[in-house]
Amino acid sequence: MLPRLRAELQWRGALSEDGALLFDPLTGREFALSRAQAVLLRTFAEQGDVGRTAAIGGEILDLDVEPEMVETLLVAFAELALLAEPDADREHLRERQRLARRRHFEDVRADKLRALLPRLRELPYYARTLPTDDDSPLTNLPVLGKSAVRAHLDEFLPASLPDEVRWMSTSGTTGERQQVVRSLVDWEASQPWTWGLNRTIQAALGERYCRLTTPFCNGNECHLRGASRAERTQGRRRSLESGLDIASFPPSRIEQMATELREHEPAYVLADPSYLAMFADQALRLGLRLPRPRFVLTAYELCSALHRRILERAFECPVFDAYGATEYGAVAVQCEAGRYHVNPECFILELAEDTEADEARELLVTTLDKQVMPLLRYATGDLARPGGAPCSCAWSETDTLASLEGRAVDSVRSTDGRRLTAGAIDRAVASAARGIVSYCLVQRGEASYRLEVLPAEDFVENSLPAVVEALRAVLGPGAQLRADRRRELLPASSGKFRLAYAEPRAR
């Protein structure tokens, strides 16, 4: 007798014309089945015989179902470890399913890449730079730099643009601002996929949320200072008033922001971590009541461990971080276990080769579903460390990142010439810091550094020497480090804050 479906599998809801969901509690994954697949599997679970399943299932579906169709379906489900295997332990089944799902997504990405290359050659830039062989490995294809996009923007665009597009600009924190075109269709195709990698986030999509980010143009909004509450509320989203001097906002503005947050009753808050942490610290100082959202989602710039601590304390909820950019949207998001998971179907994310001795690598992004301004091996300028063993969450088959390390240009050098990413600096500061909202480490010479610290509501004066010692340990022997308290920190001209960087003369 053929093996049946594993007994612990659960059908979610009633069978409909759209099909049904099959849930595997062992791995936490749901499988969306067509109506025909669901009928045949349910019938097989009852009958345990291929021939009877084909006959009975065919009557229910009013189709001619051959036994071979049932057998093909069962083979696919056996590969996913959804059929009972008496001698298999739980870890074996979990790993079987993970590998089968990983092969599936690898095949999907390979098929999409093959279809993408001929379409890219229809654009003038790629027609000039891509080889004619569609079977070339991705790693043999040229890397696309930001300077090329700036210099040849018109060559990345089709002869005619669809109606639903937005002209946008990158922030330009560490270089020139770059103009890009975003298709709303492209955006809506990839973003839900990414947010679905975290079920807590996925469950809140479509509900009210508040957003706080830089006061300059980003996305589709410009400077919001002076805009009324109604003007800053669009459907389920309310954008909070922002400003470069957010660390020194008067109490009246902090109270207004807290009131707007409470009144909107957001399911979540989407924010630049620096801005939200500075607001949250002042709200704590004033004893203001803040809403209790399901989570805070940080994006736009590197989230410091110090930012995360304050946000978790102020909002009493988990904080998840996302990685993306104006050019391509959200590529990866932290799961509930804290690992960054890469959208497995819409992007290919590579970690470029690097001559540095640390684990950080530059991220190269290929967009597989983008119809307007697609990007092939786009050099982001962002650094990350690869994930190690498979994650413990339901999306264990996806490519993962252990951490984001910040922009390459935000790295500093130790006294012996080693690269220290902004992420490495943050780990050193966070290991010793107590009561600090944010900071900025500036390298001014080969062995000269300045640390500017923004104290938090619970700042402890004697904690600063411990931070200095922790930094000196990673900066190397002979590091001359001066630490100063600041009443406020100011962002770069883009409106974004930098946790670390080297002045030009220090490079």
Image (cartoon, rainbow, N blue to C red):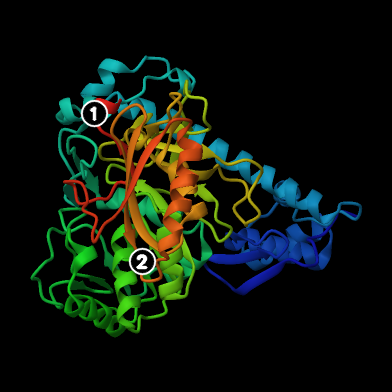
Q: Which mark is residue 504?
A: 1
User: Which secondary structure, mark 1?
Assistant: helix
- Circle 2 residues within 10 Å: few <14, some 14–19, many ≥20: many
Task: Check if mark 1's residue and mark 2's residue have beta carbons within 8 Å.
Answer: no
Residue at image coords 82%, 59%: 4
| Sequence-first tag of 1 and 2 | 2
- Give the image location of residue 357, x and y in percent: 52, 25
- Badge 2 element: loop
Instruction: State the separation of the CA atoms marked 1 and 2.
Output: 30 Å
Amino acid type at circle 2 is Ala
Could you tell me the amino acid type at mark 1?
Answer: Pro
Q: At which x and y percent is residue 3?
A: 85, 55
Outermost residue to the left? 226
- Of residues 202 and 245, which is closer to you in this image? 245
Image coordinates of residue 472 in percent, x first then y, are: 46, 39
Q: Is residue 425 visible?
A: yes
Q: What is the crowding at mark 1: few (fewer than 14 residues within 10 Å), some, or many (at least 20)? A: few
Residue 456 badge: 2
For the C terminus, which image quadrant? top left
Q: Is residue 237 left or right of residue 59?
A: left
Q: For the image shown, how many numbered marks are present on the structure? A: 2
Left or right: residue 349 versus residue 506 is right
Q: Nearer the viewer, residue 464 or 72?
A: 464
For residue 347, what is the image quadrant? top left
- Residue drawn where x is 53% and y is 57% of the image: 335
Above or below — where is 472 with respect to 312? Answer: above
Looking at the rendered image, the quarter that the N terminus falls into is: bottom right
Residue at 47 percent of width and 18 percent of height? 136
